[in-house]
Image (cartoon, helix red, strand yellow):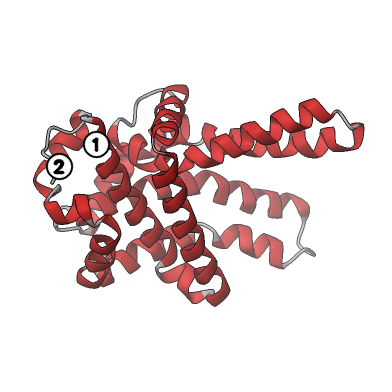
Amino acid sequence: MPFFEEFEADALAEETLRRPIRGAFALLREQLERLVALNVGWALQLLPALVALAWPGWPLGLRLLLVAYSALALMPATALLFSGVARLNRQEPLDLVTLGAELRRLALPSLRTLAPLPGLCGLLCLLIVAVGPVRLLLVDVLLRLGLLVLLFSAAYWGPLFLAEPEQPAWLLGGRALRLAWRYPLATACSLLLVLAIMLVGYLSIAGFFLIAPVLAALLLWRRTLVLLARRGELRVELP
């Protein structure tokens, strides 16, 4: 992909390809303050929804408005999170001016391209709940299988979106599915590690708001670089 070739060719050193996980934690130590700032900015978009859930006595319309804001704002925030991770991975300076420019560039594409995929996951969840009482076994199995496949490929949505923000959502989903299909073990290991990080962050609460999501994004970004290099979509020599 041209984006990765242009953006990451000089960053794909032997350490990145052989040790994507160790390299991610090394970058975390080097860029801790910037990564924490990125994570806090992302997590703040969840606060309105959390407030709406914490105070059920508030008017329903206001609570729905707060939840809708979080649901919409989370997509541009996620795109910006991956963009910041990519730049820090290349050891580029990251400041408010750069983040503002990236947010303007990625906000609308994230709503057109990135948002439909988690939206489809939500729709499948609703259909599974609706089909359950009817006892349509085959339909229920197919819906659950489709949801699992989507969630399995979700590891690559962020990095592949950043590679081409204007691509259609179906194309992004197809590329992520092909990558997950070709490397199921690497994908499963990455997802398990990300789930463990998010679980620890959730249990500690502070960890979720300070570091867990951005560390997960960093791990997924570096894993995507490695797999694309193996597929030959990055013109670099594997060690």
Residue drawn where x is 46% and y is 65% of the image: 197
Q: Foreground: 103 or 201?
A: 201
Q: Where is residue 191 shown, x and y percent of the image?
A: 47, 51
Q: Foreground: 58 or 231?
A: 231
Q: Name the N-terminal-most of marks 1 and 2.
A: 1
Q: Is residue 226 left or right of residue 197?
A: left
Q: Is residue 168 left or right of residue 203?
A: left
Q: Residues within 10 Å of mark 2 (few under 14, many from 20)?
A: some
Name the residue type under label 1: Arg
Q: Where is residue 152 shown, x and y percent of the image?
A: 52, 41
Are discs 1 and 2 less than 8 Å apart at CB? yes
Kindly identify which numbered label has been placed on residue 25: none
Q: Quadrant of residue 214?
A: bottom left
Residue drawn where x is 31% and y is 48% of the image: 223
- Give the vertical position of 23 relative to 178 (above or below): below
- Give the vertical position of 87 relative to 131 (above or below): below
Residue drawn where x is 18% and y is 33% of the image: 234
Alpha-carbon distance for marks 1 and 2? 7 Å
Q: In the structure shown, which secondary structural element does the residue marked by tag 1 occupy?
A: helix
Which residue ends up furthest to the right in the rendered image?
A: 134
Q: Where is residue 12 shown, x and y percent of the image?
A: 14, 47
Residue drawn where x is 70% and y is 31% of the image: 143
Q: Residues within 10 Å of mark 1 (few under 14, many from 20)?
A: some
Name the residue type under label 2: Leu
Q: Foreground: 13 or 50?
A: 13
Q: In the structure shown, which secondary structural element does the residue marked by tag 2 occupy?
A: loop
Q: Quadrant of residue 5?
A: top left
**Residue for badge 2:** 238
Q: Where is residue 95 shown, x and y percent of the image?
A: 20, 59
Q: Quadrant of residue 122?
A: top right
Give the position of the N terminus as an image quadrant: top left
**Residue for badge 1:** 230
